[in-house]
Every structure is written in structure tokens, then in C-alpha cells.
Amino acid sequence: MSEHGNLNDYLFQRDFLQGYVNDYVSKGFKLAKFFTPQQTDADTFTKIKDEMTIDEAIESGRMHKPRPMVKNADIEMIADEFYETEIGYIRSIGYGIQVNEKLMKRDPTQVYTTLNRISKLAYLMALGLETSCYDAMKEGAGIKGDALAGIGDLVGTGVDQKGVTDAIIDYGLAFDLDDIADQELQYIIARKPVLADIRKKLNSNEIVVNNDYSKIHGWTPETSYNYAGVNFNIGSKCMQNTEIFGVGANAKLGNIFYMTEEGAFKPNISIGEGASAYAPFINVTLEEPNRKEMKDVWTIRMKANVGVSIDNPKALLYDDNVGTLS
């Protein structure tokens, strides 16, 4: 065994690669983590869309408030006719690389070079999966920025701390659907430069009001922060700096449906936290060398079959006009 370890412990063990790739990909999820993973063996799935709040359903006449019932009366059944369903489709993304075992044995350091290549491909897969979530969230949001009349620009030039706070309050009011649902704005998701600019505009007032120097000075672009009861989280690279998502509390946003390949399995080894919730979200397969045609060449394939469903549009806000960074 060389000082670099046994080659088979790395590249040519599917168990290792399955855990390695799933862990790497899941760490890159910014938007996907707001969805619930659901495994499926079909290439389609049903999306249930709840477009109305309770108050809106009552106002439209599709539901009514409780009525007095006479003694021994049957319970009146109210049909959920304001729920809509549609079919969603699973799409596949993936990569494959070929590895020459003979060359690897000649230079074992190439193991780590190849693992680095696999990491980069896993990153691109994570970005592809994030893009699926982004597209669904952008299209399916029940609250759009243009519906928030008069909100200030969160990050534009000349916007002060009060303007940012007022905008956050207006966003929060947009989520105040009804008393029963207790729907409130819990997360604002944006790119790092947007979060940084909002943070700058909030700093001066927060130092005075909350006297909390540690929270302000300890913040980095890699961390989220909380202001006025709202968590500001880092968004995906597929988002633009002019975009934000708002996600409501106490309501399930939607599902990520994923289909596994035949023989896919959960890793038996622990690479790190994060992979277990999604594995085998990314399916990894190994094709052994064909000794006659492609001697010593292994093929490593990474594939994901995924579909995204927004189940509660009213739990999602999308604004694509948060301004130009100052």
C-alpha cells in the first residue's frame, strides 16, 4: 500500500462515491433545503396547488363559515373544490467521467485529482438541482413583488435603515393570511451581496437600539442573520442580485421528487452531515473495464432524476426588483 492509501478505497468503490457525491451536493443546497424530499418510482408526480386562503375561499363562496346545525343532523361535507392538481415531470441531469486504472496506479496522487474533478461535477449537479428549485419558486410564488404597492427598495442607493425596516414589515404583512393558518414571513433568501448591503443599512440603528456589537461584528458573508423576526439566508448562485424569495412559517412549501436508479442505495459510510436526508438523491454507478475494448478504463456516472412541486404558493414571495447595489 502506498503512502496515499489503497486506490480501491477511493475511486472504485461505489459505496464511497455514493456518500462522497451526495454529501458534497447536499452541502450546496440553498433553495432545495426548503423542500421536503420525496422518493418516487414514477417519471411523473401530482402537484396539489392551494391557491386560496381560508378567507379568500369564504369570500368567493367556495367555503362558508360554520352554521348552526339542528339536533341529529349529518355533518355537512364541504368539497375542496378550490384545490387544483396538475402533473409534474421528472427530469434527469448527470455527468460521466472515465478513469484509467493503470495510470492511477502509476501515479497515486491522481486519485485526489480525480476526486477533485468529481467534486466539481457534483457542484454543477447541485447548481442544476438548485436551478430546478429556483425555476419552480419563481414561477409558483403566490405573492409577487409588484403586488406589494409602495414597499421601499431594500438595497438601492439612498435607502436608509428605516426604508429597509419598512420594506421588511410590508413583506411580513403580505404573509399575514389568516388567524388559523398563522402564516408569517420567516425567511428572506438573497445573494450574498444583497444580504451584505441590507446588513450595512441595518447596522447603525441596531448598535444603538440593541447594543449588540457581537452579532454585527461577527457576521460574515457565509452566515445568515435575523432581524425583526426574519431570518436572512444566503440564496443560490442561480439567483440574480435583484431577486429575493420570502418563505412563510408554519406552511409546507413543497416537495422535491426524486427517482432512484435500479440498485441505488444509501451509503453505508458517513462522510459528513447532510447526505443522509437526500441519499440516494444522486445515483452513482461504476462500470468496470471491458478488458478487450477499453482495458483499464473505469466509467463513473453521476445522475439525478428530479422534479419540484410548489404545494402552497401563498407561502412564497418573489420579488425581482430589489434594486441596484449601492
Image: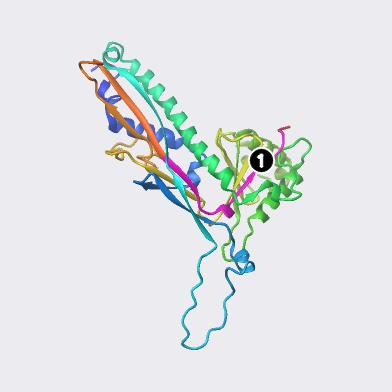
What residue is shown at x 51% (from left), y 65% (from top)? Answer: 80
Name the residue located 47 percent from the left edge and 29 percent from the top edge. 124
Residue 39 position within the rendered picture, expressed as x and y whole percent measured from the top left: 37, 47
Query: Quick check: 168 above or below 121?
Result: below
For the residue marked with disc 1, what is the amino acid? Asp
> How many marks overall?
1
Q: Residue furthest right?
A: 158
Relative to 157, is 276 on the left or the right?
left
Chosen colour scheme: rainbow
The segment highlighted magenta reads 306-324
Circle 1 SS class: loop
Residue in the image at 50% along x and 39% along y = 132
User: 304 or 19, which is in the foreground?
Assistant: 304
Q: Quadrant of the N terminus?
A: top left
User: Residue 211's image quarter?
Assistant: top right
Depth order, front residue of 26/286: 286
Q: Nearer the viewer, residue 60 or 186?
A: 60
Residue furthest to the top in view is 106
What residue occupies the far left of the structure in this picture? 292
Q: Which residue is mark 1?
A: 320
Determine the image quadrant of residue 326.
Answer: top right
* Above-or-below relation of 17 to 59: above
Label 1 environment density (alpha carbons within 10 Å; few <14, some 14–19, many ≥20): some
Residue under the image location 48 percent in, 42 percent down: 32
Quarter holding residue 179: bottom right
The location of residue 263, given as percent across then percent down, is 27, 38
287 left or right of 22 in image: left
Residue 58 belongs to magenta span: no
Residue 49 horizontal/vertical position (percent): 52, 55
Q: Position of residue 98 (x, y in %)?
A: 33, 20
Check if residue 320 falls in the magenta segment: yes
